[in-house]
Image (cartoon, rainbow, N blue to C red):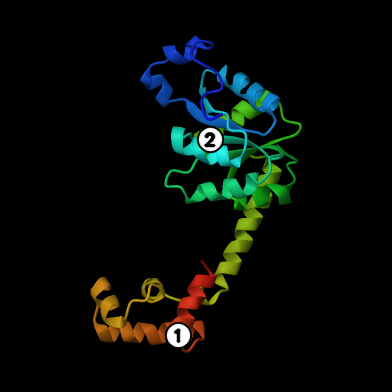
Amino acid sequence: MVGPAVGAAENPEITLRSPGERAQMARLVVCAEIRLYREGLSEALSGQPAIEVLGTPRNCDELLACLEAVNPQVVVVDTAMTGWLSAARSLRSRSDPARVVALGVRGLPDEVITLAEAGIAGYVTCEDSFERLVEIVLAVARGEMPCSPRVSWHLMRRVASLAADAHDTPLARLTVREREILVLIEQGLPNKEIARRLSIQLATVKNHVRSILDKLEVHTRGEAAAVIRRRG
């Protein structure tokens, strides 16, 4: 079901809210395969003054259709649902991606780090209360990522590790200008067009290209482009 889980006739408070009040609310959808779970959460969350439930999709396909129709800020998704993590990852490609709150997480640091790397903005453990769910939904709607101090420490260690890895790659040896030129090489532009795009001399481009090949330890422009493709 893509439409709201609670109708205006059943919940008059929704229709009485002014446009200004609605603009300040956390707009979300609840996605779960189990109907009782999905509708129960929707009804409970709809009773919160700062939350508006826009839909209750029952699977990943309905979720993607629902996002196109109602454009929520937050997606509350049951992690027991088939394919939920792939669907959550796909949201990052949207121009205005909804933030995902995962339900039923164990809360172990390694698990949370995996979720964070997948773009999950918040999580609710199996032991958390409904009040905690509301707190996390509102925080995520504000652009925050709530987590325990222990998990925060592990996340910071992961970020530091990734930063160290990034500084140890061939691409890290390039200057800002060389990276700009490498991107244009990857797009298939010849030196003359690169010079025009960047408003620099053709000879300067050629010098940069030679430096790029040396630093990346490759012999051709195609090999250089392959390096940037592998690194994303």
- Give residue 63's position: percent from left, percent from top: 55, 38
Circle 1: element type: helix
Crowding at dot 2, Cα within 10 Å, few <14 / some 14-19 / many 20+, comes out as many
Using the image, determine if residue 86 lies above or below residue 166.
Answer: above
* Residue topped by disc 2: 74
Pointer 1 and pointer 2: residues touching (CB < 8 Å)?
no
* Residue drawn at x 71%, y 44% as measured from the top left: 150
Q: From the image, state whether disc 1 or disc 2 is nearer to you.
A: 2
User: Looking at the image, which residue sits at the far bottom?
Assistant: 219
Q: Amino acid at mark 2?
A: Val
Q: Is tag 1's residue or tag 2's residue first in the polypeptide sequence?
A: 2
Quarter of the image with the N terminus in it: top right
Alpha-carbon span between mark 1 and mark 2 = 45 Å
- Give residue 127's position: percent from left, percent from top: 76, 31
* Residue topped by disc 1: 213
Q: 46 or 8, which lies in front?
A: 8
- Give residue 49's position: percent from left, percent from top: 52, 17
Res. 80 image quadrant: top right
Q: 60 or 114, which lies in front?
A: 60
Direction from residue 123 to residue 207 in the image, left or right: left
- Give residue 115's position: percent from left, percent from top: 64, 48
- Regarding residue 100, the answer to whether it shows in the image is yes
Q: Amino acid at mark 1?
A: Leu
Using the image, determine if residue 182 lies above or below residue 127.
Answer: below
